[in-house]
Image (tube, rainbow, N blue to C red):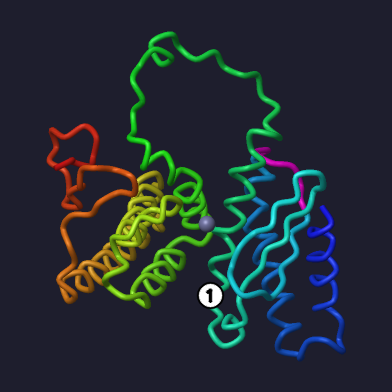
């Protein structure tokens, strides 16, 4: 808690006119607005309670969740001053808040799990379950920021060394999977619409897929990866229709 207060004081300090440059103040104000906008739909749909979100500059983009107060502190790195698309990561960070708070704030009646669900074998391997929160945050990012979130993720992954593409850190999906996962959400968002925006979203998702696939081809991306703590490697190729798990083991 003492550390939370330290961070909070530093968050407020960065808003002092004498501390930051006008560009920093402007970026912080924009980041605060974007983070609040990213949270608003979750509050509107009563997934989480109204929470104040304050942003601040720090080394890495992360969210500091404050479980005992309706407050979330989102840090982002200074490069956003010259690269505004980096602020798109704020939607992902707010997704972490929604993921953690949803079970706490959910006021609906708990539904009894069907007996067969309780006795069924775990559906996913452990390494896949370990990615759950980060997958949620990636999906939330696309629901909030749409194609821009996919584009930003592609840029982030492409900026890394190709050798890192298939590294499973035990927390985030392997980088090679994240743009594809987010693009799948975009396609699903398009599929659920019937207005003219549907075609526009579908086309945009197709363009993004093409861009990503060209990149993968250009670096001769690997077709397999080894999940953390797993003995078997996984095939990254599109699964055959008959494969129920989506990822085939080798
Ligand atoms: Zn994350």
**Residue 2 included in the magenta stretch of the image:** no
178 left or right, relative to 142: left
Name the residue located 51 percent from the left edge and 52 percent from the top edge.
Answer: 137
Which quadrant does the C terminus fall into? top left
> Residue 196 placed where, x, y %?
39, 57
Question: Measuring 86% from the left and 86% from the top, which residue is drawn there?
Answer: 17
Of residue 181 and residue 41, the one placed in the foreground of this image is 181
Whether the magenta-drawn stretch holds residue 47 is answered as: yes
- Compared to residue 208, the image places residue 72 above or below, namely above
Res 211 quadrant in image: bottom left
Residue at the location (41% across, 49% down)?
189
- Where residue 194 sits: x, y (%)? 39, 47
Q: Which residue is mark 1?
A: 86
In this rendering, position of residue 21 left or right of residue 135 = right
Residue 58: x and y in percent read 66, 74
Q: Is residue 187 above or below residue 110?
A: below
Task: Assess disc 1: are there few (<14), some (14-19) or many (≥20) residues with their C-alpha within 10 Å of its C-alpha.
Answer: many
Q: Residue at x 84, y 60 (%)?
A: 5
Badge 1 marks a residue whose secondary structure is helix
The stretch of residues the image draws in magenta is 46-51
Q: Is residue 153 left or right of residue 212?
A: right
Left or right for 135, reference 162: right
């Amino acid at each position: 808690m003492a550390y939370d207060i330290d961070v909070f004081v530093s968050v407020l300090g960065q808003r002092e006119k004498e501390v930051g440059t006008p560009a920093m103040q402007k970026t912080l104000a924009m980041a605060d607005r974007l983070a609040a906008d990213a949270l608003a739909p979750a509050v509107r749909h009563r997934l989480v309670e109204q929470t104040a979100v304050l942003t601040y500059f720090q080394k890495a983009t992360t969210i500091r969740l404050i479980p005992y107060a309706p407050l979330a502190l989102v840090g982002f790195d200074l490069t956003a001053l010259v690269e505004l698309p980096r602020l798109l990561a704020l939607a992902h960070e707010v997704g972490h808040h929604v993921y953690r708070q949803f079970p706490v704030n959910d006021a609906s009646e708990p539904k009894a799990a069907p007996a067969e669900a309780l006795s069924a074998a775990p559906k996913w391997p452990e390494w896949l379950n370990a990615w759950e929160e980060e997958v949620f945050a990636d999906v939330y990012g696309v629901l909030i920021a749409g194609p821009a979130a996919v584009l930003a993720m592609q840029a982030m992954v492409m900026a890394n060394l190709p050798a890192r593409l298939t590294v499973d850190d035990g927390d985030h999906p392997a980088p090679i999977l994240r743009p594809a996962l987010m693009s799948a959400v975009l396609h699903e968002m398009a599929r659920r619409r019937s207005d003219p925006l549907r075609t526009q979203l579908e086309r945009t998702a197709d363009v993004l897929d093409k861009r990503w696939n060209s990149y993968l081809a250009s670096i001769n991306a690997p077709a397999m990866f080894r999940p953390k703590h797993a003995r078997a490697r996984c095939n990254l190729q599109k699964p055959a229709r008959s494969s129920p798990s989506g990822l085939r083991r080798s």
